[in-house]
């Protein structure tokens, strides 16, 4: 079975085409701003403007591979920004009609996790899902992806982007902070660390960082470095606690912030110390992308899911999803 998946929950519109075993095509276009955050209608209009060309290019690339025909179309139904989700859903509906194939809606967060098993040998991991809006430690138990720990206020990516915006770095901020942190050789700047059980909190850290920046007593490089060391240590601590609690010896990283080399290094080190394995999919599958939506489409369609009502679900949580594609 071959599925074309459309991702459009937020800043990125992605079109991916995958088989059960391989990513065949994975194209994306991202809405970015030099300053400020995402304006929902602007992002949706961006997606509308580029969608036809993106689908055309994806299908052309796919046809060159000579792998047969597309059997299914899937789209992100949520969670995400309403107007952006609507563009993906409408595009998927039109495309499915023109290809004369079925289409199904997919939970974006679950797709970030599932795609790890397409490209790595991971079996039964604890997943650290670190993206823009979401920061969760998840494991599969009792027929569901259960959220064992999460952020109590904001997602790690949104936290990075907020700090970046405050200091004038533009969006997305994560990669810019990573770059600034990388070459810093000075001392760690003391910052508040907030872990509560398996949950974390980032808003106090954000306020502290903004105040430190505004005091003009610290360099941006030093703050970026110390921010990463603090926030990522919090993520790794809760991931490790969940691994011990669930008695699992695999960690899978997912979400855009998992592109960060320092976070990957810290996750790898923690796993090594525990005698566990750490799996990290390639960057193009960590950030928002259509291939993960397509792969999740295949998993669910082959397990019998059929679209009854075409919809978007802007607030659907990871643990709301009934997992019918495992075992
Ligand atoms: P969600 O899955 O919560 O809807 P999202 O749709 O916002 O998240 P993703 O593409 O999964 O998007 O993640 C985007 C986030 O990843 C942004 O906040 C961005 O700053 C962050 N990010 C991307 N690359 C890096 C990096 N190298 N280091 C740190 N953060 C990064
Ligand atoms: Fe995402």
Image (cartoon, helix red, strand yellow):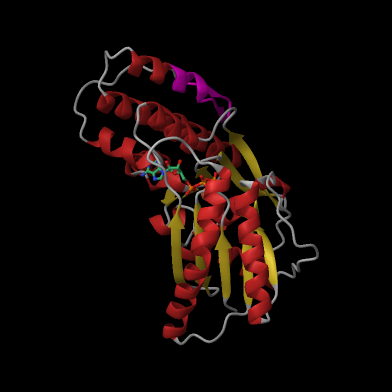
Q: Residue 50 appears at what percent x and percent y?
A: 49, 62
The quarter holding residue 270 reads top left
**Magenta-highlighted residues:** 193-207
Where residue 171 sits: x, y (%)?
Answer: 41, 40
Looking at the rendering, the quadrant in which ligand 1 lies is top left
> Does 175 appear above or below 213?
below
Q: Quadrant of residue 327?
A: bottom right
> Residue drawn at (42%, 16%), measured in percent from left and top?
208
Percent x, y for residue 45?
A: 54, 54
Residue 117 visible somewhere in the drawing: no
- The residue closer to the viewer here, 245 or 50, is 50
Q: Position of residue 214 (x, y in %)?
A: 35, 16
Residue 72 figure quarter: bottom right
Taking the image as shown, residue 227 lies to the left or right of residue 82, namely left
Residue drawn at x 27%, y 33% as measured from the top left: 181
Residue placed most toward the observer, 55 or 189: 55
Q: Describe residue 128's horizontal placement relative to residue 313 as left or right.
A: left
- Number of callouts: 0
């Amino acid at each position: 079975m071959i599925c074309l998946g459309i991702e459009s929950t937020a800043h990125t519109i992605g079109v991916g085409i995958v088989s059960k075993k391989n990513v065949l095509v994975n194209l994306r276009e991202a809405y970015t701003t030099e300053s400020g955050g995402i304006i929902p209608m602007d992002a949706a209009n961006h997606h509308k403007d580029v969608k036809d060309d993106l689908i055309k290019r994806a299908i052309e690339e796919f046809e060159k591979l000579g792998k047969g025909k597309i059997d299914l179309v899937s789209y992100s139904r949520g969670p995400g920004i309403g107007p952006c989700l609507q563009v993906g859903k409408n595009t998927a509906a039109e495309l499915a009609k023109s290809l004369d194939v079925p289409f199904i809606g997919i939970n974006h967060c679950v797709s970030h996790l599932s795609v790890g098993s397409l490209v790595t040998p991971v079996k039964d991991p604890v997943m650290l899902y670190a993206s823009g809006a979401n920061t969760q430690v998840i494991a599969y138990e009792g027929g569901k992806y259960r959220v064992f720990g999460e952020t109590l206020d904001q997602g790690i990516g949104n936290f990075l982007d907020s700090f970046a915006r405050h200091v004038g770095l533009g969006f997305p901020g994560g990669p810019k902070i990573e770059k600034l942190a990388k070459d810093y050789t000075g001392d760690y700047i003391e910052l508040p660390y907030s872990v509560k059980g398996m949950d974390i909190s980032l808003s106090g850290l954000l306020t502290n960082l903004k105040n430190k920046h505004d005091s003009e007593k610290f360099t941006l490089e030093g703050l970026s470095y110390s921010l990463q060391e603090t926030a990522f240590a919090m993520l790794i601590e809760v991931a490790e606690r969940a691994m011990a609690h669930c008695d699992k010896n695999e960690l899978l990283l997912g979400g855009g912030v998992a592109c960060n080399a320092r976070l990957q290094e810290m996750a790898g080190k923690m796993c090594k110390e525990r005698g566990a394995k750490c799996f990290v999919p390639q960057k193009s599958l960590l950030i928002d992308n259509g291939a993960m939506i397509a792969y999740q489409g295949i998993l669910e369609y082959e397990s019998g899911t059929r679209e009854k009502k075409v919809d978007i679900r802007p607030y659907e949580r990871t643990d709301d999803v009934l997992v019918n594609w495992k075992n």
